[in-house]
Image (cartoon, rainbow, N blue to C red):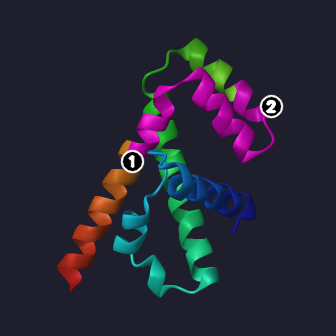
Amino acid sequence: MDRSWIHYWKKLLQNTILHNMTSQLTTEQLQALGMNALSHGQREDFLARIGKTVFDSALVALLETLNDEQIHALNHALEANESMESIVSYLQVTYPRFISYMQEVQDRFVSEYMKAMQATA
């Protein structure tokens, strides 16, 4: 599992709890996902998978709104940025709607996950 995702999402989760940011999983969402029942390593792996899924889906949503020139510029910027933090910072500054896409994808994920969990219970 790519540890940069784990570090990135741990930092985002800390920001959620400390600063009530809306672009990350909330404490309530974590509890709803059953995170408190997982070991530390399992939580990290789970968060890394969620983070990658949310990020990738939000990026696709963003790409759907861009023209070819903007997509080319975004691709160049993604290749030039080395860390996940620098990529997200770039996206936040250049495309402020990106964080909204992340929140929307995350909320859908949690909702669908909870429906699936209830259906199997």
In the depicted structure, whether residue 113 falls above or below residue 106 = below
Numbered tag placed on residue 80 in the rendering: 2
Residue found farthest to the front? 18
The mark tally for this picture is 2
Which amino acid, mark 1?
Val
Left or right, 48 with respect to 64, comes to: right
In this view of the protein, which residue sits in the foreground, 22 or 61?
Answer: 22
Numbered tag placed on residue 105 in the rendering: 1
In this view of the protein, which residue sits in the foreground, 80 or 86?
Answer: 86
Assign the C terminus to one quadrant of the image.
bottom left
Position in image of residue 64 (x %, y %): 43, 27
Left or right, 28 with respect to 69, comes to: left
Position in image of residue 15 (x %, y %): 58, 52
The CA distance from mark 1 to mark 2 is 26 Å
Residue 83 visible, this angle:
yes
In the depicted structure, whether residue 82 falls above or below residue 28 = above
Element under label 1?
Answer: helix
Position in image of residue 120 (x %, y %): 22, 83
Position in image of residue 63 (x %, y %): 49, 29
In the depicted structure, whether residue 110 falls above or below residue 81 = below
Displayed quadrant of residue 51: bottom right
Magenta stretch containing residue 84, yes or no?
A: yes
Question: Residue at 54% of width from left, 24% of height from top?
Answer: 95
Give the residues drawn in magenta, as a range.
76-103
In this view of the protein, which residue sits in the foreground, 42 or 15?
Answer: 15
Question: Residue at 54% of width from left, 72% of height from top?
Answer: 46
Which amino acid, mark 2?
Ala
